[in-house]
Amino acid sequence: MKTFCGRANPTTGAMEWLEEDENYDYHQEIARSRYADMLHDKDRNVKYYQGIRAAVSRVKERGEKAIVLDIGTGTGLLSMMAASAGADFCYAIEVFKPMADAAVKIVEKNGFRDKIKVINKHSTAVTVGSDGDMQCRANILVTELFDTELIGEGALPTYEHAHKYLVQEGCEAVPHRATVYVQLVESNRMWSWNKLFPVHVEAEDGEKIIVSPSEMENCPGVPSVCDIQLNQMPSSDFTVLSDVVTMFSVDFSKPVRSASTSYRVQLEPVKSGKAQIVLSWWDIDMDPSGMINCTMAPYWVKSTSAFQWRDHWMQCVYFLPNEEPVLKGEKVYLTACRDEYSLWYKLQKARGEEENKADVCVESPVCRCQAHLLWNRPRFGELNDQNRTRQYIKSLMKVLKTDSVCLCISDGSLLPVLAHYLGAKRFFKANHLEDKIKIIETRPELLMSSHLEDKKISVLVGEPFFTTSLLPWHNLYFWYARTAVTGHLASNVTVLPQSAALHMMVVEFQDLWRIRSPCGTCEGFDVQTLDDMIKNSMNFRESREAEPHPLWEYPCKSLSDPQEVLRFDFRETVPEHSLSTEGSVNLLRKGKSHGAVLWMEYHLVAGISVSTGLMQISNEKGNCEWNPHCKQAVYFFSSVIESEALSDLHSAVTYAINFNTKTGEIAMDFKL
């Protein structure tokens, strides 16, 4: 059966109806899932297995039958661990039907059909009793319901329900407890993801400073956590202001409460500075004694020998509502508030005990300035990037005249303000200087002469940046918008940027390859069924598509030189015909060719460009530095080519890339 799905095309801007297979959503979910990443997480799997063995032993030593409840079983891995550890029976609950079906096959394939019952329900719908889903309550509770924030996937209400209705009092739990840790830091880089810094503009009549309005300055932002690979954040980018402290713990073997609450700790700053950021992570003890521990602690807290790369659990960055000056040795209180699914933090000076207690934050922060709803964290970072802003200022100075009439097509851009300060006479902004800058709330194709006060546009500018863009080339929407407003442009119009180019490079990833790598077996269990299922869903459509990743978080080395593969000339309208290219890139270094990275480069004016991808190859090993504000496109090769010896280096990767100007989509094919 087919179904029609409506969508706004991110590149062309057109509203489209696409005919999709009824299983399209499910295939997307599987193809882009993190199941493989979890199965490649050796540290997690080994610790879970040790914890499960120990729990089954403790129950058996008491002379009881070991009945296991595994909530969110996925592949059935943890249930199979329990069955092999001697559990008498396991109830494996999985709400996602395609995954539950796969678990049934995997359980059968590994010979545990008589020991494991897969239940395709949400755990809160599971019944217990002679005619229920479970014959009796379980005495071992095994779960893996955690995200980077620990509670974001609904672990607390799930545990609360399980203790009330599905497990015995005093049951064993794997993991036994989770502990959340925090550390107070000052970081200009991370703070730039949450606040708009002043912009300095050197104009002919002196320096102008663009400052954000006070409601933006005082806005607490949005409550959602910023989860990143903190291990890729160099120590030079933040200053530690406190020791690591325990914020709170949850004992999963006892009844759990999910109702909103708060926790408070006293901190003694180890250094004076501006408290801006709370860094946070958690660990889980698989056993009551805490001997079997799995931690997300970043590199400066634990030794690198124990380091396990993973993408399904990372570390958290929380922004305090305002930066607070702290003095070394002068105690402060940090309060963590949580609801069922999220956490937020507040810092207070240590005052009278009673006065402090009364001031506990309960309300989740709400963005009042709208900017945090329009711009995501990387976008804030991009707008605060002084080097990038300087490139735009230099370019605008080259093209603006005192009588220039400008139109800016970009989402939430500062270009109109920059252009005004640099001398543009009149500025129309598509999408506070109210008398100088006119905001036109219309789509480019609906623009009328009356919007422009019957003037012709002499300078058309864009960064380009659009909030709907996921992949680098989606910002080519600027080209389609430029084409739509052609009738309003002066014959000698200047377009900035004048053109864009798509670049490509073959890379070897240090770790990111794991998210798309088949598992085969995991801790001795055959999970090939999952590999086949993911491959089938990838072939459904996704495998021929690139996917967006912020590569500053995922180290890789270049195996080829970067190469320009397609060019788009914004001085002309979008052509009717497709743009195609074929060619090859030579592999210059030995390594595993995991895939190709693609990004856009915008040529603003002659001699000035900005890159959304590669900033530089930093050494002879080929280590890459990437634009930290943008996601790059990663196309994983279906098979990995390994060039070990230098004699292999005559090998090349051939490519065929096609930009369909009707659909705005880029199709690509690579052969090794």
Image: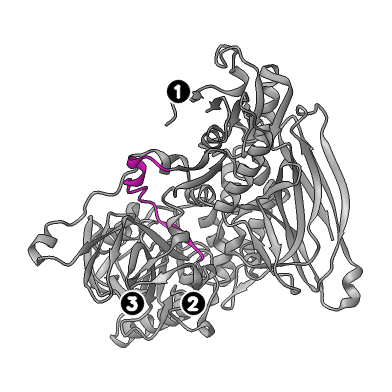
Read off the residue under disc 2: 299
Q: Secondary structure at mark 2?
A: loop
Q: Where is the C terminus found, in terms of image quarters? A: bottom right
Helix, strand or loop at disc 1?
Answer: loop
Q: Which mark is residue 320?
A: none
Q: Is residue 562 above or below residue 59?
A: above
Q: 239 or 65, which is in the foreground? A: 239
The residue labelled by disc 3 is 243
**Amino acid type, callout 3:** Asp
Most common secondary structure along the magenta stretch: loop
Q: Nearer the viewer, mark 3 or mark 2?
A: 3
Q: Is residue 386 magenta?
A: no
**In the rendered structure, are the residues bearing label 1 and label 3 in contact, judged by CB atoms less than 8 Å apart?**
no
Residue 193 x/y as whole percent: 46, 53
Q: Position of residue 5 (x, y in %)?
A: 58, 31
**N-term-proximal mark, 3 vs 2:** 3
Rounded to the nearest angstrom, the CA distance separating label 1 from label 3 is: 51 Å
Between the residue at mark 3 and the residue at mark 2, the CA separation in whole angstroms equals 14 Å
Q: Give me the disc on residue 435.
A: 1
- In the foreground, 629 or 146: 629
Q: Nearer the viewer, residue 158 or 648?
A: 648
Q: Amino acid at mark 1?
A: Asp
Examine the rendering and report whether any part of residue 481 can be seen. no
Side of 666 where 329 appears, left or right? left
When the figure is inspected, residue 99 is found, relative to residue 292, above or below; the finding is above
Position of residue 73 in the picture relative to residue 385 (left or right): left
Residue span colored magenta:
211-229
Q: Position of residue 235 (x, y in %)?
A: 49, 73
Colour mapping:
one colour
In which quadrant of the rendered view does residue 272 lie?
A: bottom left
